[in-house]
Image: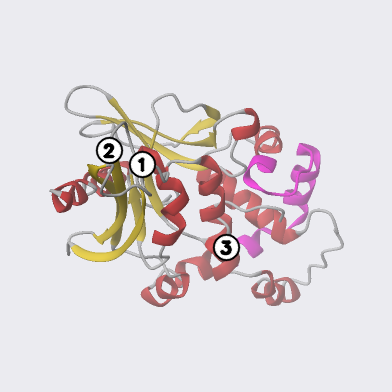
């Protein structure tokens, strides 16, 4: 795998390729493929079901965008026909058996929120000549993280007033929590780094209203959206040089005034209403500043 989505990361963690080998031996199936193995097919079918791809031809166009080895639709079809169906029944049983608390602990999926934002404190320029801000004002900026619901201070980083929030954001990261932040933290390349296995950081971050969605795919849903939710999709973010390499989930809702609120996240197993509820808790840091 060249790059992986969150789903593929989870599958490769809980069902690595070596766990499949005893099943292949039991079924007396010898996998002679080098370019596209049985394990690659397993990850492809899981992603196809997760994102509701329409078939092999559709998957051929989308699999590279999800970090999977790219092969043509005929290779996919031939491989699927060749592999015993019993193998996937065994894998399904294995996946069901792994849906427990122990597995969730191994994956390290956090529940608590880390809400991050900054506030600027200004004084006369003569008092802080080393920190000019605007006109005759000087200022320092506090980059603050608090633990949601508890309201406890997690970490504070001090900079001059002109320091961008994004530059100090790495100092606030903590993989034990779900990062919640506003638009000033919504850089697409950062989202790519958050989804890398060694740097994985779960997040819910608001995007700017003019963000471009590239290769969007709507997530299927059995029931209508409730409340203010308008859309739930996956896509690459941005375009040209600013295009993200990985796909992110995007949930779009409306605020009480009818304005769009666009949220990016890698929490693929939450409901869109759950994502919206997480972001609403960002208001706690505004109350903290006041």
Residue drawn where x is 80% and y is 39% of the image: 74
Q: Is residue 122 left or right of residue 80?
A: left
Vertical arrangement, residue 237 with respect to residue 284, above or below: above
The residue carrying pointer 2 sits among few (fewer than 14), some (14 to 19) or many (20 or more) residues within 10 Å by Cα, namely: some
Please state the horizontal and vertical placement of residue 67, each as a whole percent of the image: 66, 48
Residue at 41%, 70% (x, y): give it.
104
Between label 1 and label 3, give the one nearer the viewer.
1
84 is within the stretch colored magenta: yes
| Disc number for residue 132 | 1
Residue 246: percent from the left, percent from the top?
A: 59, 44
**Cβ–Cβ under 8 Å for marks 1 and 2:** yes
Measure the alpha-carbon separation of dots 3 and 2. 44 Å
The quadrant of the image that shows the N terminus is bottom right
In the image, which disc is placed on residue 197? 3
Q: Quadrant of residue 42?
A: bottom right
Q: What secondary structure is the stretch in magenta mostly built from?
A: helix
Mark in the foreground, 3 or 2: 2
Q: Position of residue 113 (x, y in %)?
A: 29, 59
**In this orientation, which residue lies closer to the viewer: 35 or 211?**
211
Circle nearer the N terminus (1, 2): 1
Q: What segment is highlighted magenta in the picture?
A: 63-91
Label 1 to label 2, Cα distance in Å?
6 Å
Crowding at label 1, few (<14), some or many (≥20) Cα neighbours within 10 Å?
A: many
């Amino acid at each position: 795998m060249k790059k992986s989505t969150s789903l593929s990361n989870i599958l490769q963690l809980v069902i690595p390729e070596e766990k499949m080998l005893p099943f292949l031996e039991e079924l007396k199936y010898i996998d002679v493929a080098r370019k596209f193995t049985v394990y690659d097919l397993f990850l492809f079918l899981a992603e196809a079901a997760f994102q509701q791809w329409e078939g092999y031809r559709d998957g051929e166009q989308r699999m590279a965008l999800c970090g999977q080895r790219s092969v043509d639709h005929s290779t996919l079809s031939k491989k699927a026909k060749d592999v015993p169906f019993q193998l996937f029944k065994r894998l399904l049983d294995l996946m069901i058996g792994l849906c427990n608390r122990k597995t969730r602990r191994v994956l390290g999926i956090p529940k608590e929120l880390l809400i991050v934002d900054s506030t600027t404190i200004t004084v006369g320029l003569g008092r802080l000549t080393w920190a000019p801000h605007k006109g005759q004002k000087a200022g320092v900026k506090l980059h603050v993280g608090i633990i949601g619901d508890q309201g406890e201070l997690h970490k504070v980083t001090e900079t001059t007033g002109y320091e961008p929030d994004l530059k100090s954001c790495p100092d606030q990261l903590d993989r034990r929590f779900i990062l919640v932040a506003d638009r000033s933290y919504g850089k697409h390349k950062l989202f790519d780094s958050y989804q890398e296995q060694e740097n994985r950081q779960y997040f819910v971050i608001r995007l700017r209203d003019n963000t471009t969605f590239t290769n969007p795919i709507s997530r299927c849903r059995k029931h209508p959206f409730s409340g203010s939710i308008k859309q739930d999709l996956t896509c690459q973010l941005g375009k040209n040089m600013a295009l993200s390499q990985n796909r992110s989930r995007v949930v779009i809702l409306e605020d009480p005034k009818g304005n769009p609120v666009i949220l990016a996240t890698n929490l693929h197993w939450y409901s869109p209403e759950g994502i919206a509820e997480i972001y609403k808790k960002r208001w706690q840091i505004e109350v903290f500043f006041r």
